[in-house]
Amino acid sequence: MRLEIEDSTALTFDDGSPVRAASAIAPFGDGWLVMQDDATHAAWWRPGSITPVRVVDPVDGLEEFTAAAGTKHLKPDFEAACALATGQVLLLGSGSSPNRMRASLVGSSGYTVADLRPVYLAVAAALGVTEEQLNLEGACLVGDRLRWFQRGSLASGAPTASADVDAAALLAAVRGEAPADLVRVGEVRVHDLGDIDGVALAVTDAVRLPDGRVLVSAAAEDTPNAVDDGPVVGSGLALLDGGFVAFPGAEKVEGLALREATAGEARLYAVVDADDHEVASRRLGLRLIFD
């Protein structure tokens, strides 16, 4: 595979404030929804404009969360975004603490938030990790299943892996139409993506290509557990059936969305998290050529 970065744009809201900690991107309305993992609002990026979209209620009266303020543990930490045929976007928390075991279903008329703790605990059990090791950072729809990816940390004994979840049952739980403990977890896969400079690559997001293959973004972040940040030594894109291409420099690519694809190439958007709430996240326009 070969990778071309066609453009790179700093993301700022119309009022000049930065789009913080971009963690996921998905098509939404006439633009794209970019999730901020440390805030209660996503960013709706459309030509010439970026506006906030509320995706969850304030937490203890707060809209933004930082380690410096001692509020990082309160953040919703929505790390995965899946566009649905209804035009809505399903946002999923990382599961790395109880308050991050929620989903938000975002549409043009508002949002619905659901506590999915029973689902997260079932996924953790299927993956063979403890609740403290859980760190679900990417997801994509594969047929009638949501393939949910654990961003592994070998230092904490949690490999990079994925679990298939019944998508219809999950959405029914989010909408309040059925109990969350009825959502069944299916096949589990372990993914060895290699390493960069001795630091294992772990999935940060995923998209399904039209031919059925799954493409993931992956980062090599030297961190001891599922919660703490660490130095990023590199990242890239990987096909799960083989093939990897690295991004130049030590980027932390957190979100991935497919724009269009043919048999020979795919065009995508990626978002980069600077791990600094005062620095605007960047959106990359990518062209991936399949050799």
Image (spheres, rainbow, N blue to C red):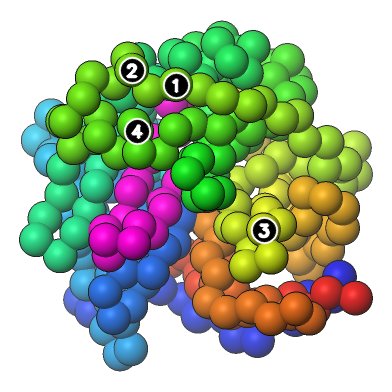
User: Of the numbered discs in the image, which one, if any, rests on residue 184?
Assistant: 1
Would residue 290 be visible to someone looking at this image? yes
Q: CA distance from mark 4 to mark 1?
A: 9 Å
Residue 193 in which image quadrant: top right
Q: CA distance from mark 4 to mark 3?
A: 22 Å
Type of amino acid under label 2 = Leu
**Pointer 1 with pointer 2, Cβ within 8 A:** yes
The x and y percentages for residue 151 are 63, 34
Type of amino acid under label 3 = Gly
81 over 163 or under it: above or below: below
Magenta residue span: 80-96
* Residue at (77% x, 49% y) in the render: 240
Q: Which residue is mark 2?
A: 182
Which element type, helix, strand or loop, lies under badge 3?
loop
Q: Which residue is mark 4?
A: 170
Q: Which residue is mark 3?
A: 212
Q: CA distance from mark 1 to mark 2?
A: 6 Å
Which element type, helix, strand or loop, lies under badge 2?
helix
Q: Magenta includes 135?
A: no
Would residue 76 be visible to someone looking at this image? no
**Pointer 4 with pointer 1, Cβ within 8 A:** no
Which is more toward the observer, 92 or 201? 92
129 over 4 or under it: above or below: above
